Structure formats: structure tokens, C-alpha cells
Image (spheres, grey):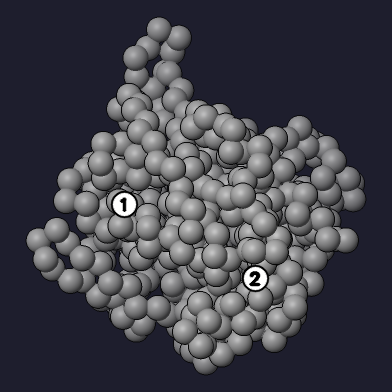
Amino acid sequence: MKRNALYILIAILPAFAGCEKYLDQAPDSTWTQLDTPEKVSQLLGTAYPQANYMAFCEAMSDNVTDKGVGVDARTNRDPYYFNDVQNVNEDSPEYYWAAAYKAIAAANNALKACENATDSAAYSRQKGEALVARAYSHFMLVNLFSKSYDAATANTDMGIPYVTEPEDVVFKQYDRKTVAYVYEQVEKDLLAGLPLIRDDKYKVPKYHFNQKAAYAFAARFYLYKRDYNKVVMYADMAFPTNQTGAYLRPWNTSYVYLTPLELFNIYTNSSERANLLLVETASPYGRYLAQYRYGMNYPMYREIMGANVTDGGWCYPVYFYGTNDYFVPKISEYFVKQSVNANIGFIYTMVPLFTAEEVLFNRAEANAMLGNTAAVLADLNLFASTRIANYDASANNITLAKCKAFYDGANNQDALLGAVLDFKRAEFVQEGLRWFDAMRYKGTITHYTSDGETLTLGPDDPRRVFQLPVTAKTSGLPMNPR
């Protein structure tokens, strides 16, 4: 197998500044002047969680190991040890919780403006975006702070508050209800909003729920709900007439010739066709993801991006700082000075919330569960054709027999699922999505420390669910069991 080349990259980056903490935030006075569709659209630019889940999700997953040395941050260390994160600032679960409910507040105020408008038909696009955005924030919250959806237990598993009205009191009491209830409400908002989504009228459609992004969200929602026929349906709606290939990142062609700086610039850029929805987050993750103590070193890189079912080598360019800090140049920071002459400022990380690659993987996984072998192989081979170095359609062709042999004689479904999830792991390394797959499949996660300690997170361990902020108790919410 051809191995990826490794390079040394040295970067000097400024220190980061903290951001304020929220439980929830009441709308400011300008939100009351929502008397045109354009003003509502402007408000909806804030209806997405402006917080990054990558740091704490990646650190909980099997993509990381203890390097012994490196940047020590609670948002990286506590999840690695399967402990509740003792941090309330950027990249913490509590910060994400607050940002998500702040986004929900924006969506709810937008919906109120749409409902109160004299000409409600003129606000249909805004209503559609607000409904889908509200569904998305609640969906992410329930998948971080509640158990993964399981039809057998969803009616009793604790959910998260589904907020549909703007807050008008300081300490409003909420009910967590159940995971099943939250999924029902997400589906209700999603299906009501989808037909109203339009791509016109946006200056940058990829900063809003455009049609492809909304269908991608629907595909993810139904995958997590295990309604596989609908996953395929919405994935096909995102990319009709087999358009998927034109939207995949060209890793083994044009990307091959890009420098790390150029890759950083394009990966989360709205001009990249693979990006369907982007959000700006206050986050230092782009600066430190390679340097965190609990991250990807050489052995972990080889585990994630080593042998695969194509018999070819991944073309992802892997770089490192020093000897331990490995990374793919994808997620980076951008720094905003407080003023023109200032040496201090704020760090932001642009996060791709939905991509063409995830749509492909969700469809492939659903087809594997449905027994549609040919469809799975078609998507896997399409993906491999853009990711394998010096790809040869004959030598690197993926077949069911190859999958079963690679996964030690597993049955058809398990062999295909293994390939899908392994490809997805390599594609989204250091982006946090691996954690959601581990949750859905209740996989055991094992972490090792440099002191020789073994840490195990089993399928039913309550620590798999992130803890609610302590401040949520003021709204009458019970904490997750520990």
C-alpha cells in the first residue's frame, strides 16, 4: 500500500481570548423591529449555534490517544478521561448548550415576526429557514445531552427542552420530556420548513439552510432515527440525477497540489462545492487541534488512515508539528483584532455543518441496512475514486467479496458497514463526527494514558451523555445520571 507522505509544518499562532457565558440570552431590542423579510433574514444569520462541538466530541472518540505532552485544556483532557468538562468557555459542552439555545431564541423570534406580518406569504422563505434551523439546534442538543435514539427506550430516555416560544421571563421552567418527544418535534419542524426553503435572496446561501443543506439535515435526522428509506430519499433529493461526484472534494486531483495554507483556506470556504452549510464559531480549536495532548499521533494516524478495502493508500496530506502532533490541514482559525493596531482579539473557527461527503456516507449506510449492496458499492467506489492516491478503477475497485475478506468474513451487511464507517472515520478525522457514530452504534471506547492506565467507556455507561450545565437547574431541569 502506498503510504502518505509526512511533512513538517511550523506555525506560530497568537493566544486566544475567552468569550462570555450564557445559559440563554433574551433577544436585544433591535429584534423587535422585524418589519421586513430582509430584517428577519438578517436575524436568521444568528439562528445557528455559533459554538464548536469538535473539541469535546473528538476527545471522547477513538480517534485520539494520550501523547504524554501537549497543550493541556479541560475541553480536551476531561472528555478523554470520560469526565464532565470543567470548563464553561469556548469548545465546552456548556458553551455549546448556551449557543444552541441562543440560536433557538433567534429562530423563535423570527417565526413570531413571520406569523405577525401583515403579508405572511412574503415571509415564507424566512419561516422555512427558521423552522429548519430550530429543528437543527434541538437535534444537536438531544444527540449531545441525551442518549442516542433507540425506538425501544426513546419513550423513557430523558430528552432536552424543546423551546418554541420566545422567553418573556428571567427564569422560565422547562421540562426535558423524552428523546422520542424531541425527535417528534424536530421532525415536525423539519417537514414543515423543508418545502419553504429557497436558495435565492441570500448573499451567501451556505451560511443559511439552503435546499441541499436542508435535505442533508433530513438525511442525517432519519439516519439517526433509523428510518433508512427516508435517508436514501432525502440524500437523493440533495443530489438528484447522480450529482454527488461533482460535489466531492477533489483530494486526489487538484487538492494534491495545494499547500497547507491553501488547503486551510479552501476546506471551510463557501466557494468549496462540498460545503453545504457553514457556521462561524468562537473557537480556538483550529489553532490547537494538532497540539492538544490528547489527539492524533503517528500510531493513531496509521490506525485511522492505514490499510483499507481498496488495497490503495489514502491521499490525504498528513502533517505534523514536532514528532507527536499530527493533523490534516482542514480546520484552521482566523483571528480578528479588537482594533486596527491591537495585538489582541478573538479567535474564530469556521465549521462545516453539512457536506456532500456526509450525504454520500449517510446514503451508503442506509443502503447497507436496507440490503442494497450495489448502491452501497457504487457510493463507496465513487468516494474512493476521489480519495485513493493514483486511483486505478480496476485495481482499487471495491467489491462485496473484498469487503468480506477485509473484515474477516463478516456477513454482507457488517462488511459493508465496516467499510462505510472506516471511510467516514478517515474523511472526518479531527472534526468530531466519529463520536456520533460511536454513540449510535453503542461502541465501547478505550483510552490509554501515558501512565499505563486503561479507561473504558462501555455501551451503557451514563458518561456517554454529556452533562447539562449546572445553571440549567434554575430552569427545573434534572441532571443526567452519573
User: Residue 418: percent from the left, percent from the top?
Assistant: 52, 76
Q: How many angstroms separate mark 1 from mark 2 (CA)?
A: 27 Å
Asked whether residue 435 is in view, the answer is: yes
Residue lying at the far top of the rendered structure: 341
Q: Is residue 141 left or right of residue 358?
A: left
Residue 160: percent from the left, percent from the top? Answer: 48, 69
Q: Can you identify the residue that label 1 sits on?
A: 298
Quadrant of image for the C terminus? bottom left
Horizontal arrangement in the rendering, residue 271 relative to residue 466 (left or right): right
Q: Nearer the viewer, residue 365 or 34?
A: 365
User: Which residue is identified by label 2?
Assistant: 398
Residue 54, percent across and down?
Answer: 43, 52
Q: Locate residue 45: give its quadrant.
A: top right
- The type of residue carrying mark 1 is Tyr
Residue ID at (52%, 34%): 264
Residue drawn 26% across the image and 53% down it: 294
Viewer-proximal residue among 171 and 24: 24
Q: Identify the residue at image location x=35%, y=26%.
A: 11
The correct choice, above or below, for 481 with respect to 67 in the image is below
Q: Position of residue 105 (x, y in %)?
A: 57, 51
